[in-house]
Amino acid sequence: MNGGEAEQVGPVPGKEPEARPYRHPAAGWGAAKAVTEIVLRQGEVVDGPRSLLRMNHEDGGFDCPGCAWPDTQGLHLDICENGVKHATWEMTRKRVGREFFAAHSVTELTQWSDFALEDQGRLTEPMVYNAETDHYVPIGWQEAFELFGSTVRALENPNQAAFYTSGRLGNEATFLYQLMARELGTNNLPDCSNMCHEASGRALTAALGTGKGTADLKDWETADALFVMGVNAASNAPRMLTTLAQAYRRGAQVVHVNPLIEAAAGSTIIPHEFTQMALLRATRTSTLNLQVRSGGDMALMRGIAKATLELAETDPGAVDRQFLDRYTVGFQEYAALCASTSWEEIELQSGISREGVRKAARVYRDADRTVISWCLGVTQHEHGVDTIREIVNVLLLRGNIGREGAGPSPVRGHSNVQGNRTCGIDHRPPAGFLDRLAAVCGIDPPRAPGLDTVGVIEAMHRGEVKVFVGMGGNFALAAPDTVYTQAALRSCELTVHVSTKLNRSHLVHGRKALILPCLGRTEKDEQAGGLQGTSVEDSMSMVHLSVGMKGPASPYLRSEPAIIAGLARAALPASATPWEWYVEDYDRIRDTMARVLDGFEDFNRRVRLPMGFRIKQPARELVFLTPSERAEFASAPLPDVLPAPGTFRLWTMRSHDQWNTTIYSDDDRYRGIKNLRTLVFMNADDMRELGIPEFGPVDVTATAKDGSTRSLTGFLAVPHDMPRGCAAGYMPEMNVLCAITDYSAQSDQPLMKQLRVTITGT
Ligand SMILES: Nc1nc2c(c(=O)[nH]1)N[C@H]1C(S)=C(S)[C@@H](COP(=O)(O)OP(=O)(O)OC[C@H]3O[C@@H](n4cnc5c(=O)[nH]c(N)nc54)[C@H](O)[C@@H]3O)O[C@H]1N2
Ligand SMILES: Nc1nc2c(c(=O)[nH]1)N[C@H]1C(S)=C(S)[C@@H](COP(=O)(O)OP(=O)(O)OC[C@H]3O[C@@H](n4cnc5c(=O)[nH]c(N)nc54)[C@H](O)[C@@H]3O)O[C@H]1N2
Ligand SMILES: [Mo]
């Protein structure tokens, strides 16, 4: 698409919305067809496919910039439809250069759809906002750095700056970025993880003394039971489908817990099994589906624990007494809590009958080894931390930790979001990390906690944060409370975005604004010391090197480490940190990281091993870095998750055809939706009761914790198989509904899966 003909997101004029149940296996030919269309649309007929064959290789090539699912050894075609979409989106031949910005004012561009903005192609050179003409105009790299440097140097204190990270950033750039922030004197390091797995980190740290899951892909491949909770795997972690299908074939149990029966809870055609593809032969990816109510996961887990403990009265093998005695604390209290939680309460709060809960408990009891995994359906709730601790309680009962085929396994989002945290993106950094950073890097890092995503938005609003740097991502759209967040960004003195593509955040800018275009992960990164690779960490703590294959989209692009070094030198002219020297050869950054970060010893050698290396995890070795030095049971009360009469619990989620704020089309294939994003999924009985017909227009009004309301009008209601009292729709269109004050007291995560709404026909 070109010029001003913005494509509408939402009901498309002339295109009829469709909603039909999807009755086919996930992946397979539908996915293959979608891949072909995407590749052709991006004009990548020649380089695209050849580069894709180098994705996720064990002996080089680049890491898929899509999700954080780990790579499989020896499998050279383990790529998925959505990974391909994601990589080709970056490899497009379209360019958005200075002529484009000269032709369109910022005010004009704000009228464009988000799809149209990103669809202009790759950014090619640094741009600065000119307030007099309301256009972005070219600026040299050095001048751009100096604009940042002089603005930061003029701040009254460093906490007036904030440094956001989107989870794509490689480890080496991550390390330099946090070093710059801390050398400046602030821990204001909000990141996208504040919106996705903050709850997981907090719960696992409290229970097990590690912020990450302990299970790896081998464990998934050897477990007797896999629980998959609150994740739409077929769209958001598609390579998990292969693991689930293989689990089913070897006779393992696969239990899906989700208010929706998502495509992964059916069957799949494994994409690299060519005979399966040819014969359209599908393998099941589920043995049990439990349609919990929104927020009902904790009650379900409590029920599984209760049933397991009941079994243990006559079946001594139901719980692992030795493990409990040797490695845990708090079991007696938890057992008493399970006994005193009534079945009625468990049924009511989970939305699952006691027979259903007992069935799941039976699966759990009969499995020697169990992995429980989860994603946003569990984390983005008020009680996300308590729910994950309840998951760990269940695992502890049967000693499902510290051995093969078992353990907790959060499914992370962005391809390096886990690595970002490991390498120092943390607004609440542990003292030990800061001590080592101080000793090795010779800086005096601030000790006071910094601001997270929600905190930064509020501080910008109050005028306390004046410089916002976005290292990737699309903060203006991804963050909650769109109107409030955008006003906050506009009140800044300077906004800086390091990006590959044009997006909304560039248009919602401060008084001064920079767009700094960077190399993508698919591109060659040449520095003085030769071709550089950068490392990433997947969902399962495997760290490996990613090396780009393609020539850069423009000769003026710089790598993320180089851009950070330029910004740092300008803001800290007298810094003793060898910024320029680091950028010449990333091995030098890695050598420093090896001295600062736990588990990164001998980093440069180990990262070059065929599959990289796994960061050692104490909890995996049954060493628990908790106050009691044991795994700790939690005994939290069950929250009341029932919607008040007349209201719904609404969650926001992704369609199959989007990557967070990047929307590829208005379709959501596995949920049977075509040509529609401004929709609300509802239970058919709820719609009938409210007199709302299929595709009937509705108003959705959310009431925040503080009583304030936010509305969307003219969304179309679509009946879907889901529990009553639940409703769902797409992010980021629905982010306006999520008040800035609505974040979890346990994790500070915005309640993106727990909006209290009324829905009325119009
Ligand atoms: N193609 C693609 N891949 C992606 C992304 C993308 O946008 N596109 N985003 C990446 C990122 S950053 C992340 S964090 C992950 C997100 O991966 P997901 O967590 O799959 O993301 P969502 O689309 O928000 O889907 C949430 C799921 O939770 C379910 N759910 C909602 N409420 C509840 C509940 O109360 N209990 C339970 N058990 N389930 C519930 C929803 O029905 C839905 O299936 O995916 C990553 N991968
Ligand atoms: N309502 C609601 N809101 C949500 C969520 C939800 O479930 N519901 N989910 C939340 C979650 S889990 C997340 S992770 C956030 C996502 O929040 P973000 O990570 O901030 O958003 P993305 O859409 O992933 O960012 C896309 C942009 O990243 C830039 N980009 C792409 N590749 C690169 C690269 O290699 N380098 C750099 N520097 N830039 C690049 C491009 O310019 C692109 O426009 O959204 C959150 N918002
Ligand atoms: Mo995420």
Image (tube, grey):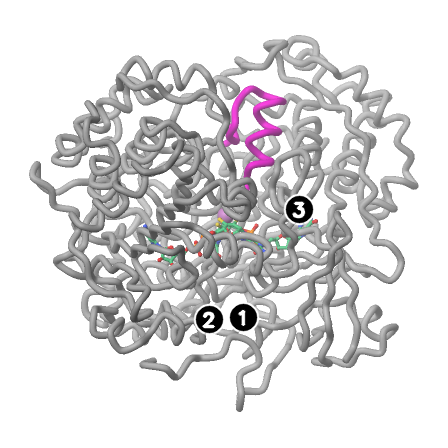
Q: Amino acid at mark 1?
A: Arg
Q: Amino acid at mark 2?
A: Gly
Q: Nearer the viewer, residue 189 or 706?
A: 706
C-alpha gap between disc 2 and disc 3: 41 Å
C-alpha gap between disc 3 and disc 1: 34 Å
First along the sequence among labels 1 and 2: 2
First along the sequence among labels 3 and 1: 1
Q: Amino acid at mark 3?
A: Thr
Magenta region: 195-215
- Residue at the spot x=78%, y=18% of the render? 316
| Tags 1 and 2 touching, CB below 8 Å | yes
Instruction: State the quadrant of the N terminus.
Output: bottom left
- Considering the numbered disc 3 on the image, is that residue within a helix, a strand or a loop? loop
Q: Image height check: is 50 above or below 323?
A: below
- Considering the numbered disc 2 on the image, is that residue within a helix, a strand or a loop? helix
Residue 412 appears in the picture as rendered: no
Q: Which residue is mark 1?
A: 669
Does the magenta run of residues contain 168?
no
Does the magenta run of residues contain 199?
yes
Q: Position of residue 385 (x, y in %)?
A: 66, 34
Rate crowding at label 3 as few (under 14), some (14 to 19) or many (20 or more) other CA atoms within 10 Å.
Answer: some
Rendering quarter of residue 346 = top right
